[in-house]
Image (spheres, coloured by chain):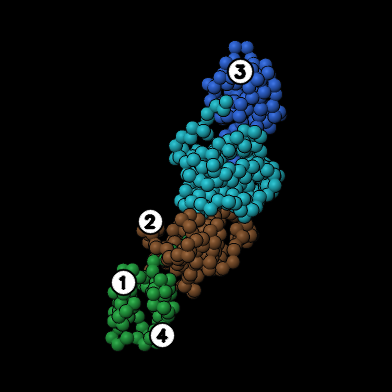
Chain colours: A cyan, B brown, C blue, D green
Amino acid sequence: MPRVTIRVQAEAFDSAHETALLLRGHEDVGGVAAFTGIVRGGGGLVALELEHYPGMTESMMRRIAESACVRFGLAGCTVIHRVGRLAVGMPIVLVLCASAHRGGAQEATTFMMDWLKTSAPFWKREEFADGRSAWVEARAQDEAAKARWGSLAACDGGKKN
Amino acid sequence: MPRVTIRVQAEAFDSAHETALLLRGHEDVGGVAAFTGIVRGGGGLVALELEHYPGMTESMMRRIAESACVRFGLAGCTVIHRVGRLAVGMPIVLVLCASAHRGGAQEATTFMMDWLKTSAPFWKREEFADGRSAWVEARAQDEAAKARWGSLAACDGGKKN
Amino acid sequence: MLRILYFAWLRDRLGRSGETLPLPQGAHCVQDLIAALNARGGEYAAIFARPELIRVAVNQSFATIAAPIAAHDEIAFFPPVTGG
Amino acid sequence: MLRILYFAWLRDRLGRSGETLPLPQGAHCVQDLIAALNARGGEYAAIFARPELIRVAVNQSFATIAAPIAAHDEIAFFPPVTGG
């Protein structure tokens, strides 16, 4: 069984520690691909405020992660998404995918990010130095990125029982 | 100027620490993609012995990393390759790519690994539980993976002055 | 009772994060609930008259406006997601 | 003097990691050096009679067997690389 870890938390994460946990006891892993999303500065941005839908978020993250494990034959994966106020330069999201071979782990990381961005119920509000604040709008290109993976029965609008 | 860090070392590395160093003072980074290569067990493998060509290794790694920074517009990248004896489960190589946008960082990581595997002078010898030991043979598929990036003037067999 | 949740700018505009509500008379699907909310006027009408701006989840799974609803369902309205 | 280096199984087979050598009479390129090493016979012939198995670097850059060489160059012979 692939080892799947899902967390939504306000606290920072330690990617090296999470990688060690993911690998523990897995001798068949040849590579771990990782992606860490960071709050990018510019345009006077000071921080993001991340909101989510508790319960649905975790279940969508788990469905995406489990789909990635099956589709890419992963030994395991870890997805941690932060919520609350995150200043510029702070990490927001960590995706780790462990696999026997490099290609699967790297593709799975891209797949997971594409799905997370479009299917996990998080919303970002931007706070600027001049006091303005605005909800971030979804980008059509994120939907297009997800679409190239085809449909995902477990994630694509199916009604949960 | 992109921040490029290249190291060949016997010691383990700490990916979280390396990520923090790579990001320090860079407010324009939106994501860091990483790949960690691990000694994969199986078939009685106990350890790898990694040998390299001191001097040429570092200069090839630097050329590959600098090419990746230009081609993918990276804010910086870090490549650390271990040498010496590495038991099953130990990390061998770390590639970190930091970029304003996710796609560039992820593609650059794949690019760097494809080039490292075919153009940096490292050689692996496998040690097995029954005492056998054998040099690993290069795989045609690694050359094919590199070839899809096209030629790379700075890395592709050019004679250094 | 239906449990209705609002997130992000829908919550800001409506001034509430959720409410409980009996299943509106004759309502069988999400679209019927949207019509009932729209009929309240004010900010509700401003939002629910334009369902293309909002996404729906029924019992914590994404759903279309044609999805059936029943008493005790949890129905959430929110803008397209922007995490990751 | 040329500085010649051998890595991985070439070093194991030849029993040495390198040597210094005067530029062989009339040698202008890597291929001429390979011919001189091949002429030694024994393990040298076994390896250098099959140049398709080996890769060459001249002054720490990958080179072809047609690459020119000159006195004081560092020339390395090794199998295809297997790092990463």
> Do marks 4 and 3 share a subunit?
no
Q: Which residue is mark 4?
A: D20
Write the residue at 51% across / 58% down. B39
Local packing at callout 4 (Cα closer than 10 Å; few below 14, some 14-19, many 20+) is few
The kind of residue on which mark 1 rests is Pro
Write the residue at 48% across / 54% down. B42
Between disc 1 and disc 3, the foreground one is 1
Checking the image for residue C70, the label placed there is 3
Q: Chain of mark 3?
A: C
Q: Picture coordinates of residue A111 (x, y %)?
A: 50, 43
Under circle 4, the secondary element is: strand
* Foreground of the two, B92 or B29: B92
The quadrant of the rendering that contains the C terminus of chain A is top right
Q: Give the Cα separation between the discs numbered 1 and 3.
A: 76 Å
Write the residue at 65% across / 41% down. A8
> Do marks 1 and 4 share a subunit?
yes
The kind of residue on which mark 2 rests is Gln
Q: Chain of mark 2?
A: B
Q: Which residue is mark 1?
A: D51
Q: Chain of mark 4?
A: D
Local packing at callout 1 (Cα closer than 10 Å; few below 14, some 14-19, many 20+) is some
Q: Give the Cα separation between the discs numbered 1 and 2.
A: 21 Å
> Do marks 4 and 2 share a subunit?
no
Q: Residue furthest front?
A: B130
Q: Is residue C68 above or below residue B37?
A: above
Query: In this rendering, does residue A25 appear at all?
Result: yes
Q: Chain of mark 1?
A: D
